[in-house]
Amino acid sequence: MRILGLETSCDETGIAVYDRDRGLLGHALYSQVGLHAEYGGVVPELASRDHVRKVLPLVRQVLDEAGVTTADLDGIAYTAGPGLIGALLVGASVARALGWSLAIPVLGVHHMEGHLLAPMLEPDPPAFPFVALLVSGGHTLLVQVEGLGQYRLLGETVDDAVGEAFDKTAKLLGLPYPGGPELARLAKTGDPARFRFPRPMTDRPGLAFSFSGLKTFAVTTLRRHQDDPTIRADIAHAFQEAVVETLAIKCRRALRQTGARRLIVAGGVGANARLRQRLAEVTVEEDAQVHFPRPEFCTDNGAMIALVGSLRLQAGERPDPELVATPRWRLDELKPPGPVRNV
Ligand code: KG4
Ligand code: ZN
């Protein structure tokens, strides 16, 4: 079974071809970062228009690189949500039109399920069950995963997502969009002993997160030391340490609470080197294993969407009879694959 995957939920056009037996045959990503940089964030209308321009040329390029033609495809998977409605509609429309013309099944996929299963694209794929930490620009979730579509929410953020907190703090430090990786770079030059930011919500039981207070902490610290030339790097360091330690404490708790022996880390912030290092240490201490996708599959990509499409269609999921674009869609609303529609 060979599946074409289309990801257009936000500011990246990701295309891939995944083969059940041979794995990933080809993938390409076009990032709109340059387009949105001057606005300091994603402009939804510009994002939709740019997906329209890029999606078909990228499909052709990936099929060529994979050495397959449209006639070799057995199905198409696209991101049906959550995401920006205009951007989602581009991928959904292209997928439906292409699927109709080729008379092959088309399946709308949950973007976060894509992130969740992305570690399965790697050579040493994790087996179910596991605990997943999903950390992206829009989500911060701890999920107990028993199998495909069996997701129990253990904890989520009560305010900002962790990627959002990285981006907002980076912006106030004067760093260009998208701020997460820029802040991580700056943090390397910061003085580790200078500040200690709080670890929000770690002093009480539970697995909920809150990150908006850290951003405020960064603002007030910056105001107090306006003229200090190293202040930005020191704040970046303290901010990143606080985020990473908070996530590490909650992951340790989630492993103990569920008795799971495997931790999956995915989503854009999963590309953060300090987070990867710290979670590797924690899982060793907990006698558990940790799995990350390679950094390019932590951030948005088409490979994870093609993979979910392949797993679900293969497990007997009935393809969607119509176009699906769902801007708000909770991960724990998903069901295991079956003849019943997924949304
Ligand atoms: O998963 P993703 O590509 O898109 C969403 O679905 O949101 O995640 C993007 C988020 C952004 O907030 C970005 O700043 C953050 O992931 N990010 C990072 C790093 N790389 C990406 N945050 C911290 N450190 C990084 N190295
Ligand atoms: Zn994402």
Image: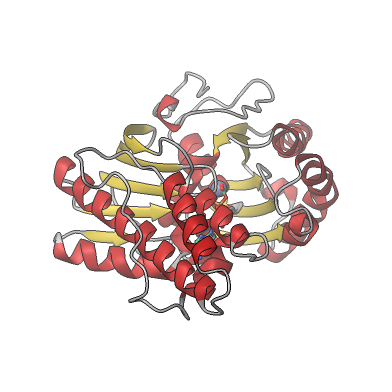
**What's the colour scheme?**
secondary structure
Along the horizontal axis of the image, is 253 left or right of 95? left
Residue 63, quarter of picture: bottom right
* Vertical arrangement, residue 73 with respect to residue 89, above or below: below
Q: Quadrant of residue 76?
A: top right
Q: Is residue 86 left or right of residue 83?
A: right
- Residue 314 against residue 31 in the figure, above or below: above
- Marker count (numbered): 0
Residue 79 seen in render: yes
Residues 97 and 53: in front is 53
Q: Nearer the viewer, residue 36 or 91?
A: 36
Q: Position of residue 292 (x, y in %)?
A: 39, 61
Identify the residue at image location x=66%, y=28%. 325
Which residue is found at the position 17% from the left and 41% from the top?
258
Above-or-below relation of 263 to 277: above
User: What residue is drawn where x is 67% and y is 34%?
Assistant: 104
Q: Is residue 123 visible?
A: no
Residue 39 position, x and y percent, is 77, 53
Q: Compare residues 225 and 64 and report the one nearer the observer.
A: 225
Residue 188: x and y in percent read 46, 78
Q: Quadrant of residue 229?
A: bottom right
Quadrant observed for ligand 1 in the rendered image: bottom right
Residue located at (29% from left, 44% from top): 201
